[in-house]
Amino acid sequence: MKTKGWSNVLRFTYLQTVRSKSFIISNIVIFSLLLLMMAGVNFLPKLIGSEAEKDTIQIDDGQGNIIEAAAFKIEKVYILDKSGVNPDFSFLTAYKVEYEFIGEDKLGQTMNTVAAGEKPETLLVIERDETGMFTLTMDRPDNADLVKNSDCNSLLNFFYLSVKNANYISLGVSAGDLYLADAPIITKVTVNGEEPPSEIARYMGMMSTMVTSLILFMLIIMYGQLTAQSIATEKTSRVLELLLTSIKPLAVIIGKVLAMMLVVITQVAAIFSASAILFMIFAPAGTLGEIFGMVETDDVEVAMISQGLRNTFADFGASQILLIVLIFILGFLFYSLIAGLIGASISRIEDLQTAMQPMAIISVLGFYLSYFTPMMGMNEDGGNAFLTKLSYYLPISSPFALPGAIMSGEIGADELTVAIGVLAASVALFAMFVAKVYESIILYTGNRLKIKDMIKMAKR
């Protein structure tokens, strides 16, 4: 049988790879990065939040509720009110900002006081022209370390609301009707009666697609190149000639490809196991636990992220994981068969990099197609529908595009079935091509074979 002995090649290549220093060191580096990432994601938001709490104050909203609000760096505001509507600025007391009304006669003196920059003080002038338009001008000292434009703009937003409310009252709107007059108006778009995913859910889906594409691309290409390098090294060092005395050539490439695939699965399983252990250690005491619902949170932003995750991955389960594993195996076989064929087509190890260039170009094109399509708009209105469908059905891009689409629920069952079928058929056809030409290529010595030469061999 032409494939007899492939299991021996698989066993030898697998053990040789996992025992190598490069494999062990790479795993140590990955686990160290995972540890830092888990700790950072879990505790860094808490540390930042604790620092932010120092710049907040508690305010009574007038209905007995205590709310947290940002503290202003401006300590005092001098106000020259020429609006004629008498706005109420008593809210400044709650924010621990002093204020003092001045007249026109003290304007010049006050401007000099503010310009001196001895304290974080500003001057606010409120004017109204003949058309009824209000202008609020806040003058700050030249020292940006004392008062910044952002500090002024934050405070001006509150002054704007006070002047606006005072104008309503001057026009006959009662204080009790101010809230109703300014009631928020919400607009939304539905698709067939259902609301589309929220911005956070769409962002989560986009990120999951992009990150998954990047990880799969790195794994498939890196270990595919190792397959080519292993075959090329054994061929050019004449080790393969000894090996072929007892094992058929086709068994060699089958064993090499399956061994590298097993190495990838081993590494991915180790990474996921380490991630799960680190998650269980860190999550209960930080932000990760709040995001994944293990710990209750009163942080609105964290709650929104948590809800977005649930919405994005609501339908993600064991069947989806199995589909992703199947797609990864098919994609790995597709690219590894190409790499193995390239490794067998050269007679000198120095030619390997040049020979690998066509595969590198094809794989990068497939990766870019799957990676940048979600970045260009997540296909919200069908604007990127063509590129998205193309990335699903092309065998050079589907191994990178389909897993992310499955995770985010962006692909339907019918489309997924067709896409996996096209990828599987491509792998089968290429495997048949490799089986026809590999025995001739592996023993070939001379100039590097080109694709057209291999096609001629397959026809014969």
Image (spheres, helix red, strand yellow):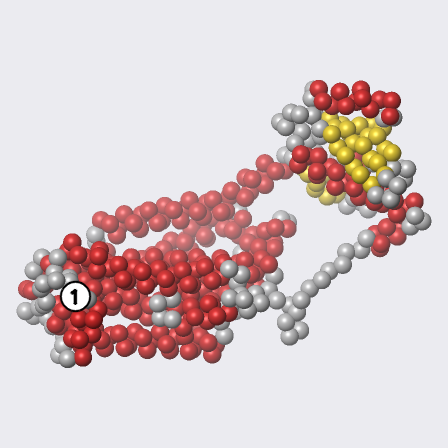
Which residue sits at x=47%, y=44%?
40
The secondary structure type at the circle numbered 1 is loop
Look at the image and tell me in which quarter the C terminus lies. bottom left
Residue 267: x and y in percent read 31, 57
* On screen, residue 125 above or below 361: above
Is 27 left or right of 197, judged from the image as shown? left
Query: Residue beneath label 1, please?
Result: 449
Name the amino acid type tagged 1: Leu
Identify the residue at horizontal 16%, vertical 54% (top origin). Answer: 350
Q: 44 or 92: nearer the eye?
A: 92
Classify residue 414 as left or right of residue 442. right
Pick the front one: 98 or 43? 98
> Looking at the image, which residue is at 28% across and 62% down?
359
Q: Residue furthest right?
A: 172
Q: Is residue 433 left or right of residue 76?
A: left
Q: Is residue 266 above or below residue 281?
A: below
How crowded is the residue under tag 1: few (<14 C-alpha within 10 Å), some, or many (20+)?
some
Compared with 17, 5 (above or below) is below
Q: Quadrant of residue 338?
A: bottom left
Expressed as whole percent of the image width and height from the top left, the position of residue 183 reads 80, 55
Where the N terminus falls, by quadrant? bottom left
